[in-house]
Amino acid sequence: MTYLRNNWWKLLGVLLLLYVIAGGLLFEAPQLPVIRETVRNIYFHVGMWFSMMFILFMALIFSLRYLRYFRPEDDLKALSAVKTGLVFGTLGLFTGMVWAHNTWGSFWVNDPKLNGAAVGMLTYLAYMVLRGSVDDADKKARLAAVYNVFAFVLFFVFIMILPRLAQDSIHPGIDGNPALSTGDLDPRMRKVFFPAIAGWMIMAWWIFRIYYRITLLRKGLEELNEND
Amino acid sequence: MPGEINTMIRKELTLEWRQKFAFNGVLLYLVSTVFVCYLSFSGIIDVPTWNSLFWVIMLFAAINASLKSFIQERDGRLLYYYTLLKPQAVINAKIVYNALLMTTLSLTGLFVYIAFLGNPVQNPVLFIFNLVLGVIGFSSVLSMVSAIASKARNNFTLMAVLSFPLVLPLLLVLIRVSAAAIDGAALREQAPNLLVVLLLIAITMVLSNILFPYIWKE
């Protein structure tokens, strides 16, 4: 019971997602031309991007905290958060590509929002490459934190500003950030959409914690091996 | 601090003038790339391709030029700066110097490019204004990335990998404005896009000033 009292949010996340999977597939959804039943993908596709932005924002916070106090844990937390963000970003790309194939006829279209997503993924893959090419742990942490802050701000500016400048986007979401413009969302879908967002974000946080614990254990193991 | 920046820029320029290493090297790189493009694209090139190709060449030249801004500095010399200067003075001086270097290079590059591949530009004022603004933007992003990459192994690969995603937003706006300039658009029409470029430059400058002190200390 103590476990459940401390980890009630995990149970909440699981229940929310079970509800989302059942409700998302069974509840009534608006029948739009071309999109038709694929509209249900919104609970999964948008949820992925929302969780990715959330967890990458947390990575930014950890990096800033690292630059403030220089505690190695904060750097490992930022690394775990970026890894989680990459997992959700990849899933977001895949769910989006499947959807695009069904509605727009091809897996990838040249659209500012899609390109923004691709650039974001490239940025964080570059972050991983940067970590791989520095040996000294302290230096690695500092460079990675600096790059993370630099990259997050530019990436955020990119996905917020550029789609607004381009008039020709076929991706929904008028305000540049498709996930936040719920004004054009059918009221019938909201009772699954909002729990879906919350559920995926909880899931992202959970995965992040597990990643972080794996990273800590791996680091401890390395230190043990070095001491032998 | 303005005095420190001034001295640093003067030092960079003097060094460049004596060695002419960065300028000549990148200029040769630029001319060779243009020539390769001339050999492979001549006759089949249309106007949008002309524009995109130009910017791709500029981007690679800019990455090459800014790569050396920190890597050529020996550890001992950085330590010497460390005792003399504020970190902000160093990064600002590098940004200004890179901007100067790249403006010169890009204008020369444009001249060579036009000589080989023709000149479809209808509004040269907007085109050149956009070009100068663009290379200043490149140098503000790339100076910081070069500072990060210089601290790691395989700097050249790392430099390209780290800077592409960060430069891309800027590059897309620049290509759009210069495409409009080729079609003869007025400066006023493109003001919102140019403002975005200015905004991106401002953001990178602020970030560089805040973040550079952290990578400078060993």
Image (tube, coloured by chain):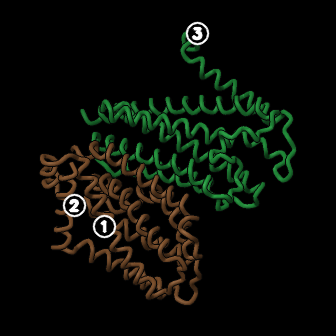
Chain colours: A green, B brown
The residue mark sitting in front, 1 or 3, is: 1
Q: Which residue is mark 1?
A: B100
Query: With respect to residue B186, does B137 lie above or below?
Result: above
Q: Measure the alpha-carbon separation of dots 3 and 2.
A: 66 Å
Q: Chain of mark 2?
A: B
Whichever of labels 2 and 1 marks the residue nearer the N terminus, that label is 2
Q: Are marks 2 and 1 on the same chain?
A: yes
Query: With respect to residue B15, does A55 lie above or below?
Result: above
Q: Residue at x 68, y 50 (%)?
A: A96
Q: Chain of mark 1?
A: B
Q: Circles 2 and 1: CB distance less than 8 Å?
A: yes
* Residue type beneath disc 2: Ile
Left or right, residue B23 beside residue A195: left
Quarter of the image for residue A72 reads: top left
What percent of the width, then of the height, locates residue A177?
A: 63, 45
Query: Which quarter shows the C terminus of chain B?
Result: top left
What percent of the width, then of the height, locates residue B52?
A: 53, 73
Q: Are marks 3 and 2 on the same chain?
A: no
Q: Which residue is mark 3?
A: A1
Depth check, front residue: A99 or B132: B132
What percent of the width, then of the height, locates residue B211?
A: 33, 44
The label shown at residue A161 is: none
Q: Circles 1 and 3: CB distance less than 8 Å?
A: no
Q: Residue at x 26, y 61 (%)?
A: B69
Numbered disc 2: secondary structure:
helix
Q: Which residue is mark 2?
A: B9
